[in-house]
Image (cartoon, rainbow, N blue to C red):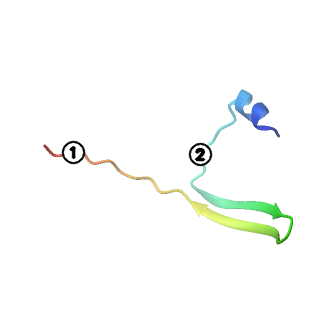
Amino acid sequence: MELRTRWGAHDVRRHGTGTKRFQHPAIGVLALAYESLDLAVEPAST
């Protein structure tokens, strides 16, 4: 699906963990695991 179609559909979801698969022409299939990191913001001290 093209970016324009996805953007127009607002089909955006948050994924905390998972695996993305890519087909590289020279190497073949790459399976990359990912995990999000949420950073907590602390109030600035004055």
Residue furthest to the bottom = 27
For label 2, the SS is: loop
Q: Position of residue 24 (x, y in %)?
A: 82, 64
Viewer-proximal residue, 16 or 8? 8
Residue at 16% over, 46% down:
45
Q: Classify 35 as above or below 11.
A: below
Residue at 73% over, 27% down:
8
Which residue carries the number 1 mark? 44
Residue furthest to the top = 8
Q: Position of residue 6 (x, y in %)?
A: 74, 35
Which numbered dot is residue 20? none
Residue at 65% over, 38% down:
12
Tell me which numbered mark, 2 or 1, is placed earlier along the sequence: 2
Callout 1 amino acid: Ala
Q: CA distance from mark 2 to mark 1?
A: 28 Å
Q: The C terminus appears in which quarter of the rendering? A: top left
Q: Position of residue 9 (x, y in %)?
A: 73, 29
User: Is disc 1 surrounded by few (<14), some (14 to 19) or many (20+) residues within 10 Å?
Assistant: few
Which residue carries the number 2 mark? 14
Residue at 86% over, 65% down:
25
Q: The N terminus appears in which quarter of the rendering? A: top right
Callout 2 amino acid: Arg
User: Would you identify the image quadrant in which residue 3 lies?
Assistant: top right
